[in-house]
Image: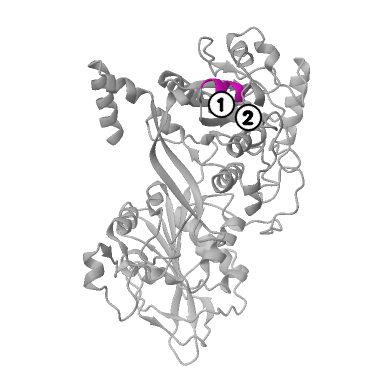
Protein backbone atom coordinates (compact mmCIF):
# COMPACT_ATOMS: atom_id res chain seq x y z
CA UNK A 1 0.00 0.00 0.00
CA UNK A 2 2.80 2.40 0.89
CA UNK A 3 4.44 1.81 -2.50
CA UNK A 4 1.12 2.43 -4.29
CA UNK A 5 0.69 5.77 -2.50
CA UNK A 6 4.27 6.75 -3.33
CA UNK A 7 3.70 5.95 -7.01
CA UNK A 8 0.46 7.95 -7.02
CA UNK A 9 2.16 10.92 -5.39
CA UNK A 10 4.98 10.87 -7.93
CA UNK A 11 2.49 10.63 -10.80
CA UNK A 12 0.58 13.67 -9.51
CA UNK A 13 3.75 15.72 -9.13
CA UNK A 14 4.99 14.85 -12.61
CA UNK A 15 1.60 15.61 -14.13
CA UNK A 16 1.69 19.07 -12.57
CA UNK A 17 5.15 19.75 -13.96
CA UNK A 18 6.53 20.46 -10.50
CA UNK A 19 10.23 21.22 -10.04
CA UNK A 20 10.13 19.14 -6.86
CA UNK A 21 8.96 16.23 -8.97
CA UNK A 22 12.01 16.53 -11.19
CA UNK A 23 14.26 16.47 -8.13
CA UNK A 24 12.48 13.45 -6.68
CA UNK A 25 12.82 11.53 -9.93
CA UNK A 26 16.59 11.77 -9.75
CA UNK A 27 16.79 10.46 -6.18
CA UNK A 28 17.39 6.78 -5.55
CA UNK A 29 15.89 5.60 -2.24
CA UNK A 30 17.88 2.53 -1.17
CA UNK A 31 17.65 0.19 1.79
CA UNK A 32 21.27 -0.60 2.68
CA UNK A 33 21.68 -3.93 4.49
CA UNK A 34 24.85 -4.63 6.45
CA UNK A 35 26.01 -6.91 9.28
CA UNK A 36 27.47 -5.57 12.51
CA UNK A 37 28.84 -7.59 15.42
CA UNK A 38 26.52 -7.89 18.41
CA UNK A 39 29.57 -6.84 20.46
CA UNK A 40 33.27 -6.62 19.56
CA UNK A 41 34.76 -10.06 19.03
CA UNK A 42 31.48 -11.96 19.53
CA UNK A 43 31.51 -13.50 16.06
CA UNK A 44 27.72 -12.98 15.95
CA UNK A 45 26.14 -10.38 13.71
CA UNK A 46 23.00 -8.31 13.66
CA UNK A 47 21.59 -7.90 10.14
CA UNK A 48 20.64 -4.24 10.08
CA UNK A 49 18.98 -2.23 7.33
CA UNK A 50 19.43 1.50 6.89
CA UNK A 51 16.20 2.47 5.16
CA UNK A 52 15.46 5.09 2.51
CA UNK A 53 19.05 6.20 2.05
CA UNK A 54 18.93 8.91 -0.61
CA UNK A 55 21.49 8.73 -3.43
CA UNK A 56 21.55 11.30 -6.20
CA UNK A 57 21.16 9.22 -9.36
CA UNK A 58 23.33 11.69 -11.25
CA UNK A 59 26.18 10.83 -8.89
CA UNK A 60 25.57 7.10 -9.19
CA UNK A 61 26.77 4.41 -11.58
CA UNK A 62 25.46 0.89 -11.95
CA UNK A 63 28.03 -1.62 -13.24
CA UNK A 64 26.97 -4.85 -14.93
CA UNK A 65 29.73 -7.40 -14.33
CA UNK A 66 30.36 -10.29 -16.74
CA UNK A 67 26.81 -11.11 -17.80
CA UNK A 68 28.27 -13.03 -20.73
CA UNK A 69 26.51 -14.60 -23.68
CA UNK A 70 28.02 -18.01 -22.83
CA UNK A 71 29.94 -19.74 -20.07
CA UNK A 72 31.80 -23.01 -19.52
CA UNK A 73 29.25 -23.94 -16.81
CA UNK A 74 25.84 -24.78 -18.29
CA UNK A 75 23.97 -24.14 -15.04
CA UNK A 76 25.59 -20.73 -14.84
CA UNK A 77 24.23 -19.99 -18.33
CA UNK A 78 20.76 -21.07 -17.26
CA UNK A 79 20.85 -18.77 -14.27
CA UNK A 80 22.02 -15.82 -16.40
CA UNK A 81 18.98 -16.40 -18.62
CA UNK A 82 16.76 -16.19 -15.53
CA UNK A 83 18.46 -13.09 -14.13
CA UNK A 84 18.52 -11.07 -17.32
CA UNK A 85 14.87 -9.94 -17.72
CA UNK A 86 14.61 -8.38 -14.27
CA UNK A 87 18.16 -7.06 -14.49
CA UNK A 88 17.24 -5.29 -17.73
CA UNK A 89 14.31 -3.66 -15.92
CA UNK A 90 16.72 -2.49 -13.21
CA UNK A 91 19.02 -0.94 -15.82
CA UNK A 92 16.10 0.87 -17.44
CA UNK A 93 14.97 2.23 -14.06
CA UNK A 94 18.46 3.42 -13.14
CA UNK A 95 19.04 5.00 -16.57
CA UNK A 96 15.68 6.74 -16.55
CA UNK A 97 16.50 8.33 -13.19
CA UNK A 98 19.80 9.69 -14.47
CA UNK A 99 22.31 7.08 -13.29
CA UNK A 100 25.20 6.03 -15.53
CA UNK A 101 24.99 2.40 -16.70
CA UNK A 102 28.36 0.74 -17.36
CA UNK A 103 28.39 -2.60 -19.16
CA UNK A 104 31.48 -4.62 -18.20
CA UNK A 105 31.59 -7.97 -20.01
CA UNK A 106 35.26 -8.71 -19.35
CA UNK A 107 37.36 -9.89 -22.27
CA UNK A 108 34.71 -8.95 -24.81
CA UNK A 109 35.70 -5.40 -25.75
CA UNK A 110 36.44 -6.35 -29.36
CA UNK A 111 32.72 -6.87 -29.95
CA UNK A 112 32.09 -3.24 -28.96
CA UNK A 113 35.08 -1.52 -30.58
CA UNK A 114 32.91 0.79 -32.67
CA UNK A 115 30.06 1.35 -30.21
CA UNK A 116 29.65 4.86 -28.73
CA UNK A 117 29.70 3.48 -25.21
CA UNK A 118 33.14 2.00 -25.77
CA UNK A 119 34.46 5.33 -27.00
CA UNK A 120 32.82 7.08 -24.06
CA UNK A 121 34.80 4.99 -21.58
CA UNK A 122 38.08 5.26 -23.45
CA UNK A 123 37.85 9.03 -23.84
CA UNK A 124 37.49 9.90 -20.16
CA UNK A 125 40.51 11.96 -19.03
CA UNK A 126 42.97 10.40 -16.62
CA UNK A 127 41.88 11.00 -13.03
CA UNK A 128 44.23 12.84 -10.72
CA UNK A 129 43.24 10.48 -7.89
CA UNK A 130 43.78 7.23 -9.85
CA UNK A 131 44.48 4.44 -7.28
CA UNK A 132 47.78 2.68 -7.80
CA UNK A 133 46.37 -0.86 -8.21
CA UNK A 134 43.03 -0.05 -9.84
CA UNK A 135 44.02 -1.99 -12.95
CA UNK A 136 44.56 -5.25 -11.07
CA UNK A 137 42.46 -8.00 -9.52
CA UNK A 138 41.90 -7.66 -5.79
CA UNK A 139 41.63 -10.99 -4.00
CA UNK A 140 41.17 -9.67 -0.47
CA UNK A 141 40.94 -6.47 1.50
CA UNK A 142 42.25 -6.13 5.08
CA UNK A 143 38.79 -6.10 6.63
CA UNK A 144 38.22 -9.65 5.38
CA UNK A 145 40.93 -10.90 7.73
CA UNK A 146 38.30 -10.66 10.47
CA UNK A 147 36.42 -13.69 9.16
CA UNK A 148 36.91 -16.94 7.25
CA UNK A 149 36.05 -17.11 3.57
CA UNK A 150 32.82 -19.16 3.43
CA UNK A 151 33.20 -21.37 0.33
CA UNK A 152 35.64 -23.79 -1.27
CA UNK A 153 35.74 -22.69 -4.91
CA UNK A 154 39.23 -23.86 -5.77
CA UNK A 155 37.95 -26.30 -8.39
CA UNK A 156 36.13 -23.49 -10.21
CA UNK A 157 32.69 -23.89 -8.72
CA UNK A 158 30.98 -25.66 -11.62
CA UNK A 159 27.79 -27.41 -10.52
CA UNK A 160 26.78 -29.10 -13.79
CA UNK A 161 25.62 -32.65 -14.19
CA UNK A 162 28.73 -34.40 -15.63
CA UNK A 163 26.92 -35.76 -18.68
CA UNK A 164 25.28 -32.42 -19.45
CA UNK A 165 28.60 -30.68 -18.92
CA UNK A 166 30.35 -32.82 -21.54
CA UNK A 167 27.48 -32.34 -24.00
CA UNK A 168 27.57 -28.58 -23.43
CA UNK A 169 31.30 -28.39 -24.08
CA UNK A 170 30.90 -30.47 -27.23
CA UNK A 171 28.24 -28.05 -28.41
CA UNK A 172 30.40 -25.02 -27.70
CA UNK A 173 33.26 -26.53 -29.68
CA UNK A 174 30.90 -27.32 -32.57
CA UNK A 175 29.94 -23.64 -32.93
CA UNK A 176 33.52 -22.42 -32.73
CA UNK A 177 33.56 -21.35 -29.08
CA UNK A 178 36.39 -22.26 -26.73
CA UNK A 179 34.67 -24.58 -24.21
CA UNK A 180 36.61 -23.17 -21.25
CA UNK A 181 36.17 -19.50 -22.22
CA UNK A 182 33.27 -19.25 -24.68
CA UNK A 183 32.14 -15.69 -24.00
CA UNK A 184 32.18 -13.21 -26.88
CA UNK A 185 29.82 -10.44 -25.73
CA UNK A 186 27.32 -9.46 -23.08
CA UNK A 187 24.06 -11.41 -22.93
CA UNK A 188 21.86 -9.85 -25.60
CA UNK A 189 18.75 -9.49 -23.40
CA UNK A 190 20.54 -6.69 -21.53
CA UNK A 191 19.93 -3.62 -23.68
CA UNK A 192 22.69 -1.09 -24.26
CA UNK A 193 21.66 2.52 -24.75
CA UNK A 194 24.21 3.90 -27.20
CA UNK A 195 23.28 7.47 -26.32
CA UNK A 196 23.98 7.13 -22.58
CA UNK A 197 25.72 3.90 -21.50
CA UNK A 198 29.42 3.17 -21.22
CA UNK A 199 31.21 -0.09 -22.06
CA UNK A 200 34.48 -1.10 -20.43
CA UNK A 201 36.21 -3.94 -18.61
CA UNK A 202 39.10 -1.76 -17.43
CA UNK A 203 39.41 -0.62 -13.85
CA UNK A 204 41.41 2.40 -14.99
CA UNK A 205 38.87 3.47 -17.62
CA UNK A 206 35.94 3.00 -15.27
CA UNK A 207 37.64 4.94 -12.47
CA UNK A 208 38.43 7.78 -14.91
CA UNK A 209 34.83 7.83 -16.06
CA UNK A 210 33.52 7.95 -12.49
CA UNK A 211 35.92 10.76 -11.63
CA UNK A 212 35.06 12.80 -14.73
CA UNK A 213 31.35 12.71 -13.87
CA UNK A 214 31.72 13.25 -10.13
CA UNK A 215 30.25 9.82 -9.39
CA UNK A 216 30.76 8.70 -5.80
CA UNK A 217 28.08 5.98 -5.57
CA UNK A 218 28.29 2.61 -7.36
CA UNK A 219 25.90 -0.36 -7.52
CA UNK A 220 27.44 -3.66 -8.67
CA UNK A 221 25.37 -6.48 -10.13
CA UNK A 222 26.09 -9.43 -12.40
CA UNK A 223 28.12 -12.61 -12.02
CA UNK A 224 29.81 -14.21 -10.29
CA UNK A 225 29.82 -12.60 -6.87
CA UNK A 226 32.47 -14.79 -5.25
CA UNK A 227 34.86 -14.25 -8.16
CA UNK A 228 34.43 -11.41 -10.65
CA UNK A 229 31.99 -9.15 -8.80
CA UNK A 230 34.27 -9.12 -5.77
CA UNK A 231 37.66 -9.28 -7.41
CA UNK A 232 37.68 -7.50 -10.77
CA UNK A 233 39.58 -4.19 -11.03
CA UNK A 234 36.17 -2.48 -11.08
CA UNK A 235 34.74 -4.86 -8.47
CA UNK A 236 33.46 -4.44 -4.94
CA UNK A 237 36.81 -4.75 -3.18
CA UNK A 238 38.64 -2.18 -5.29
CA UNK A 239 35.83 0.34 -5.12
CA UNK A 240 35.28 -0.15 -1.38
CA UNK A 241 38.92 0.15 -0.39
CA UNK A 242 39.36 3.23 -2.62
CA UNK A 243 36.55 5.20 -1.05
CA UNK A 244 33.49 4.81 -3.27
CA UNK A 245 30.07 4.32 -1.74
CA UNK A 246 29.62 0.88 -3.26
CA UNK A 247 26.87 -1.70 -2.76
CA UNK A 248 26.08 -5.12 -4.16
CA UNK A 249 22.60 -5.74 -5.57
CA UNK A 250 22.29 -9.05 -3.79
CA UNK A 251 19.41 -10.57 -5.74
CA UNK A 252 20.84 -9.69 -9.16
CA UNK A 253 23.85 -11.97 -8.88
CA UNK A 254 24.98 -15.60 -8.70
CA UNK A 255 27.97 -17.60 -7.49
CA UNK A 256 30.29 -20.19 -8.92
CA UNK A 257 29.80 -22.81 -6.22
CA UNK A 258 29.49 -26.61 -6.37
CA UNK A 259 27.40 -28.09 -3.53
CA UNK A 260 29.69 -31.14 -3.54
CA UNK A 261 32.38 -28.90 -2.02
CA UNK A 262 32.73 -27.41 1.47
CA UNK A 263 30.51 -26.38 3.23
CA UNK A 264 28.25 -28.85 1.40
CA UNK A 265 25.21 -26.60 1.10
CA UNK A 266 22.88 -25.91 -1.81
CA UNK A 267 24.11 -23.67 -4.62
CA UNK A 268 21.71 -20.94 -3.51
CA UNK A 269 22.87 -21.14 0.10
CA UNK A 270 26.38 -20.74 -1.28
CA UNK A 271 25.30 -17.41 -2.75
CA UNK A 272 23.74 -16.42 0.58
CA UNK A 273 27.00 -17.17 2.38
CA UNK A 274 28.96 -14.95 0.00
CA UNK A 275 26.43 -12.13 0.38
CA UNK A 276 26.71 -12.50 4.15
CA UNK A 277 30.51 -12.30 3.90
CA UNK A 278 30.25 -9.15 1.80
CA UNK A 279 27.80 -7.50 4.21
CA UNK A 280 30.14 -8.22 7.12
CA UNK A 281 33.49 -7.26 5.64
CA UNK A 282 33.21 -5.44 2.29
CA UNK A 283 30.11 -3.29 1.75
CA UNK A 284 26.33 -3.12 2.20
CA UNK A 285 23.84 -4.71 -0.18
CA UNK A 286 20.54 -3.60 -1.72
CA UNK A 287 17.73 -5.40 -3.54
CA UNK A 288 16.37 -4.86 -7.04
CA UNK A 289 13.02 -3.89 -5.56
CA UNK A 290 14.62 -0.69 -4.25
CA UNK A 291 15.03 0.61 -7.80
CA UNK A 292 11.92 -0.96 -9.25
CA UNK A 293 9.67 0.10 -6.38
CA UNK A 294 7.91 -3.25 -6.03
CA UNK A 295 9.57 -4.34 -2.78
CA UNK A 296 10.50 -7.72 -4.23
CA UNK A 297 13.70 -9.70 -4.28
CA UNK A 298 14.36 -11.94 -7.26
CA UNK A 299 14.72 -15.67 -6.58
CA UNK A 300 15.77 -18.34 -9.04
CA UNK A 301 13.07 -20.82 -10.00
CA UNK A 302 15.13 -23.66 -8.57
CA UNK A 303 15.44 -21.96 -5.20
CA UNK A 304 12.52 -23.42 -3.25
CA UNK A 305 14.07 -23.17 0.21
CA UNK A 306 11.80 -21.93 2.99
CA UNK A 307 13.20 -18.91 4.83
CA UNK A 308 13.95 -20.16 8.35
CA UNK A 309 14.70 -17.49 10.95
CA UNK A 310 16.45 -18.48 14.18
CA UNK A 311 15.66 -16.10 17.03
CA UNK A 312 18.41 -16.47 19.64
CA UNK A 313 18.42 -14.48 22.87
CA UNK A 314 19.33 -16.57 25.89
CA UNK A 315 22.43 -16.58 28.06
CA UNK A 316 22.32 -19.90 29.87
CA UNK A 317 22.60 -22.78 27.39
CA UNK A 318 24.95 -21.24 24.82
CA UNK A 319 22.65 -21.68 21.85
CA UNK A 320 24.33 -18.63 20.32
CA UNK A 321 27.22 -21.07 19.78
CA UNK A 322 25.44 -24.37 19.18
CA UNK A 323 22.69 -23.26 16.81
CA UNK A 324 24.95 -21.61 14.18
CA UNK A 325 27.05 -24.79 14.05
CA UNK A 326 23.93 -26.95 13.82
CA UNK A 327 22.48 -24.75 11.07
CA UNK A 328 25.70 -24.85 9.07
CA UNK A 329 25.83 -28.64 9.18
CA UNK A 330 22.16 -29.59 8.86
CA UNK A 331 20.14 -26.80 7.27
CA UNK A 332 22.15 -25.33 4.40
CA UNK A 333 20.75 -27.62 1.73
CA UNK A 334 17.03 -27.32 2.41
CA UNK A 335 16.59 -23.92 4.07
CA UNK A 336 17.44 -20.28 3.61
CA UNK A 337 18.70 -19.58 7.11
CA UNK A 338 18.93 -16.24 8.90
CA UNK A 339 19.85 -15.47 12.51
CA UNK A 340 18.28 -12.78 14.67
CA UNK A 341 20.28 -12.27 17.86
CA UNK A 342 19.28 -10.43 20.99
CA UNK A 343 21.20 -7.37 22.07
CA UNK A 344 24.33 -8.11 24.11
CA UNK A 345 23.79 -4.97 26.18
CA UNK A 346 20.02 -4.58 26.55
CA UNK A 347 17.86 -7.58 27.49
CA UNK A 348 14.80 -5.68 26.35
CA UNK A 349 15.90 -5.40 22.72
CA UNK A 350 16.24 -7.78 19.79
CA UNK A 351 17.62 -5.64 16.95
CA UNK A 352 16.36 -6.42 13.46
CA UNK A 353 13.48 -8.56 14.73
CA UNK A 354 11.44 -7.06 11.86
CA UNK A 355 13.21 -9.61 9.62
CA UNK A 356 10.56 -12.05 10.87
CA UNK A 357 8.13 -10.39 8.48
CA UNK A 358 9.96 -12.02 5.53
CA UNK A 359 10.48 -15.44 7.15
CA UNK A 360 8.50 -18.60 6.44
CA UNK A 361 9.35 -20.45 9.66
CA UNK A 362 10.77 -19.52 13.07
CA UNK A 363 12.99 -21.36 15.53
CA UNK A 364 12.92 -19.79 19.00
CA UNK A 365 15.72 -19.99 21.56
CA UNK A 366 14.87 -17.07 23.82
CA UNK A 367 14.84 -16.90 27.63
CA UNK A 368 12.75 -14.46 29.65
CA UNK A 369 12.94 -11.46 27.36
CA UNK A 370 10.01 -9.05 27.70
CA UNK A 371 10.35 -6.76 24.72
CA UNK A 372 9.08 -3.43 23.48
CA UNK A 373 5.55 -4.02 22.30
CA UNK A 374 6.47 -3.03 18.75
CA UNK A 375 9.13 -5.78 18.69
CA UNK A 376 6.97 -8.47 20.29
CA UNK A 377 4.21 -7.69 17.80
CA UNK A 378 6.40 -9.10 15.03
CA UNK A 379 6.31 -12.47 16.81
CA UNK A 380 2.59 -12.23 17.50
CA UNK A 381 1.83 -11.53 13.84
CA UNK A 382 4.10 -14.36 12.75
CA UNK A 383 2.27 -16.89 14.95
CA UNK A 384 -1.17 -15.55 14.01
CA UNK A 385 -0.33 -16.08 10.33
CA UNK A 386 -0.22 -19.83 10.96
CA UNK A 387 3.46 -20.21 10.15
CA UNK A 388 5.68 -23.08 11.39
CA UNK A 389 7.17 -22.66 14.87
CA UNK A 390 10.07 -24.60 16.38
CA UNK A 391 11.15 -24.16 19.98
CA UNK A 392 14.01 -25.48 22.07
CA UNK A 393 14.59 -25.41 25.83
CA UNK A 394 13.81 -21.90 27.15
CA UNK A 395 11.39 -21.12 24.32
CA UNK A 396 8.64 -22.20 26.75
CA UNK A 397 9.24 -19.00 28.75
CA UNK A 398 10.72 -16.90 25.96
CA UNK A 399 8.91 -13.61 26.56
CA UNK A 400 7.99 -13.89 30.23
CA UNK A 401 9.69 -11.87 33.00
CA UNK A 402 11.99 -13.68 35.45
CA UNK A 403 10.18 -16.14 37.71
CA UNK A 404 8.65 -14.39 40.70
CA UNK A 405 9.40 -10.97 39.23
CA UNK A 406 6.29 -9.73 37.41
CA UNK A 407 6.65 -7.06 34.81
CA UNK A 408 7.13 -3.77 36.62
CA UNK A 409 4.69 -0.94 36.10
CA UNK A 410 7.48 1.33 34.93
CA UNK A 411 8.51 -1.16 32.25
CA UNK A 412 4.95 -1.72 31.11
CA UNK A 413 4.36 2.02 30.85
CA UNK A 414 7.63 2.30 28.93
CA UNK A 415 6.29 0.07 26.18
CA UNK A 416 7.85 -3.23 27.28
CA UNK A 417 5.44 -6.13 26.98
CA UNK A 418 5.40 -9.79 27.95
CA UNK A 419 3.72 -12.87 26.48
CA UNK A 420 3.10 -14.94 29.57
CA UNK A 421 1.01 -17.66 27.90
CA UNK A 422 3.31 -18.04 24.88
CA UNK A 423 4.02 -21.63 26.03
CA UNK A 424 0.36 -22.60 26.09
CA UNK A 425 -0.64 -20.76 22.93
CA UNK A 426 2.25 -21.80 20.70
CA UNK A 427 3.67 -25.07 22.04
CA UNK A 428 0.74 -26.44 24.03
CA UNK A 429 3.01 -26.83 27.05
CA UNK A 430 2.70 -25.96 30.70
CA UNK A 431 6.18 -25.06 31.97
CA UNK A 432 6.29 -24.23 35.68
CA UNK A 433 9.85 -25.06 36.79
CA UNK A 434 12.50 -27.76 36.53
CA UNK A 435 13.96 -30.55 38.63
CA UNK A 436 17.33 -30.19 40.31
CA UNK A 437 20.23 -29.50 37.94
CA UNK A 438 22.08 -32.64 39.05
CA UNK A 439 19.18 -34.92 38.07
CA UNK A 440 19.95 -35.62 34.43
CA UNK A 441 17.02 -37.21 32.62
CA UNK A 442 17.17 -40.43 30.66
CA UNK A 443 15.29 -39.95 27.39
CA UNK A 444 12.98 -42.58 25.88
CA UNK A 445 10.27 -42.78 23.24
CA UNK A 446 6.80 -41.96 24.56
CA UNK A 447 4.24 -44.75 24.48
CA UNK A 448 1.77 -44.37 21.64
CA UNK A 449 3.99 -42.04 19.59
CA UNK A 450 4.02 -44.54 16.75
CA UNK A 451 6.35 -44.28 13.74
CA UNK A 452 6.29 -40.47 13.77
CA UNK A 453 8.36 -38.59 11.18
CA UNK A 454 10.10 -36.60 13.94
CA UNK A 455 11.50 -39.84 15.39
CA UNK A 456 12.78 -41.23 12.08
CA UNK A 457 16.42 -42.34 12.21
CA UNK A 458 16.85 -41.56 15.93
CA UNK A 459 18.75 -44.04 18.06
CA UNK A 460 18.53 -43.04 21.73
CA UNK A 461 20.80 -45.81 23.08
CA UNK A 462 20.22 -44.93 26.75
CA UNK A 463 20.48 -41.24 25.92
CA UNK A 464 20.94 -39.10 29.03
CA UNK A 465 20.67 -35.33 28.62
CA UNK A 466 22.88 -32.92 30.57
CA UNK A 467 19.80 -30.67 30.95
CA UNK A 468 17.69 -30.48 34.05
CA UNK A 469 14.24 -31.95 33.43
CA UNK A 470 11.54 -29.36 32.83
CA UNK A 471 8.17 -29.75 34.57
CA UNK A 472 5.70 -29.26 31.73
CA UNK A 473 2.76 -31.55 32.52
CA UNK A 474 -0.01 -31.62 31.71
CA UNK A 475 0.29 -30.82 28.01
CA UNK A 476 -2.68 -29.18 26.39
CA UNK A 477 -5.11 -31.18 24.25
CA UNK A 478 -3.97 -31.54 20.66
CA UNK A 479 -0.32 -32.16 21.48
CA UNK A 480 1.46 -35.39 20.55
CA UNK A 481 4.15 -36.41 23.07
CA UNK A 482 7.10 -38.04 21.31
CA UNK A 483 9.88 -38.34 23.89
CA UNK A 484 9.82 -38.56 27.67
CA UNK A 485 12.46 -37.58 30.22
CA UNK A 486 12.82 -39.62 33.42
CA UNK A 487 14.66 -38.97 36.67
CA UNK A 488 14.57 -41.35 39.67
CA UNK A 489 11.79 -40.78 42.16
CA UNK A 490 9.68 -38.49 39.99
CA UNK A 491 7.03 -38.85 37.32
CA UNK A 492 8.24 -38.71 33.74
CA UNK A 493 7.83 -35.50 31.75
CA UNK A 494 7.43 -34.94 28.00
CA UNK A 495 10.65 -33.54 26.48
CA UNK A 496 9.58 -33.40 22.82
CA UNK A 497 6.18 -33.05 21.20
CA UNK A 498 4.27 -31.72 18.22
CA UNK A 499 1.14 -29.65 17.93
CA UNK A 500 -1.11 -28.33 15.18
CA UNK A 501 -2.33 -24.98 16.45
CA UNK A 502 -5.80 -23.50 16.13
CA UNK A 503 -4.42 -21.10 13.51
CA UNK A 504 -3.39 -24.10 11.40
CA UNK A 505 0.33 -23.71 11.97
CA UNK A 506 2.55 -26.58 13.04
CA UNK A 507 4.62 -26.37 16.23
CA UNK A 508 7.47 -28.61 17.35
CA UNK A 509 9.02 -28.13 20.77
CA UNK A 510 11.71 -29.87 22.79
CA UNK A 511 12.79 -28.96 26.31
CA UNK A 512 16.22 -30.36 25.46
CA UNK A 513 18.80 -27.95 24.05
CA UNK A 514 21.76 -27.79 26.44
CA UNK A 515 25.01 -27.28 24.51
CA UNK A 516 25.87 -30.86 25.50
CA UNK A 517 22.76 -32.13 23.72
CA UNK A 518 24.09 -30.73 20.45
CA UNK A 519 27.08 -33.08 20.69
CA UNK A 520 24.66 -36.02 20.52
CA UNK A 521 23.64 -37.25 17.03
CA UNK A 522 20.24 -38.29 18.40
CA UNK A 523 19.40 -34.74 19.47
CA UNK A 524 20.63 -33.18 16.23
CA UNK A 525 18.54 -35.68 14.27
CA UNK A 526 15.55 -34.89 16.48
CA UNK A 527 15.84 -31.16 15.94
CA UNK A 528 16.41 -31.59 12.20
CA UNK A 529 13.36 -33.84 11.93
CA UNK A 530 11.29 -31.46 14.03
CA UNK A 531 12.12 -28.54 11.78
CA UNK A 532 11.26 -30.58 8.70
CA UNK A 533 7.96 -31.70 10.22
CA UNK A 534 6.95 -28.19 11.23
CA UNK A 535 7.82 -26.86 7.76
CA UNK A 536 6.35 -29.89 5.97
CA UNK A 537 9.69 -30.42 4.21
CA UNK A 538 11.22 -33.75 3.29
CA UNK A 539 14.90 -33.77 4.08
CA UNK A 540 17.75 -36.09 4.96
CA UNK A 541 20.65 -35.23 7.25
CA UNK A 542 24.09 -34.68 5.73
CA UNK A 543 25.91 -37.86 4.80
CA UNK A 544 29.31 -36.24 4.28
CA UNK A 545 31.97 -35.64 6.88
CA UNK A 546 31.29 -32.01 7.75
CA UNK A 547 33.72 -29.69 9.49
CA UNK A 548 32.85 -26.30 10.94
CA UNK A 549 36.23 -24.85 10.04
CA UNK A 550 37.17 -24.30 6.43
CA UNK A 551 40.52 -25.72 5.27
CA UNK A 552 43.30 -23.35 4.25
CA UNK A 553 42.34 -22.15 0.79
CA UNK A 554 45.15 -20.31 -0.93
CA UNK A 555 44.06 -18.23 -3.93
CA UNK A 556 40.47 -19.17 -3.20
CA UNK A 557 38.86 -16.25 -5.01
CA UNK A 558 40.64 -16.76 -8.30
CA UNK A 559 39.60 -15.53 -11.76
CA UNK A 560 37.35 -17.73 -13.86
Q: Give residue 16's quadrant in the image.
A: top left
Q: Is 136 in front, or is 401?
A: 136
Mark number, residue 234: 2
Q: Secondary structure at mark 2?
A: loop
Q: Residue furthest front?
A: 128
Q: Position of residue 159 (x, y in %)?
A: 68, 38
Magenta span: helix, strand or loop, mainly?
helix
Callout in the foreground (2, 1): 2
Q: Position of residue 213 (x, y in %)?
A: 51, 21
Q: Position of residue 393 (x, y in %)?
A: 45, 71
Q: Which residues are magenta?
A: 207-213
The residue beneath circle 1 is: 63
- What residue is drawn where x is 43% and y is 45%? 49
User: Is residue 208 within the magenta segment?
Assistant: yes
Q: Give residue 419's quadrant in the image.
A: bottom left
Q: Looking at the picture, does residue 321 appear above or below residue 460? A: above
Q: Secondary structure at mark 1?
A: strand
Amino acid sequence: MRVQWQRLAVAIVVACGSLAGAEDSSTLKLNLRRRTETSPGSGRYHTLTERDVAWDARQTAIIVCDMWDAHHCLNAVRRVHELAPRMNQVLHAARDRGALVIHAPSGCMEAYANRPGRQLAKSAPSAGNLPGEIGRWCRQIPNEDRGAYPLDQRAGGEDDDPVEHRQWHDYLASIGRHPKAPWKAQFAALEIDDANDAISDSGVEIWNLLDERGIKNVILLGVHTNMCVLGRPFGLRQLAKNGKHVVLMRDMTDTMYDPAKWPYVSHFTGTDLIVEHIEKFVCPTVASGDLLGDGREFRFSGDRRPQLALLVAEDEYKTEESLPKFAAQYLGRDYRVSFIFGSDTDRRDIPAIEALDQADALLVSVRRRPLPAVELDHVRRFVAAGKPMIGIRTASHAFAPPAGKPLGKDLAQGGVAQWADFDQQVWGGNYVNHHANDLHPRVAVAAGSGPHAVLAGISLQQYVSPCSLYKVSPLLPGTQPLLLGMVPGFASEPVAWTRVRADGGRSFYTSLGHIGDFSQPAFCQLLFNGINWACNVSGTPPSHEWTATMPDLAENSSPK
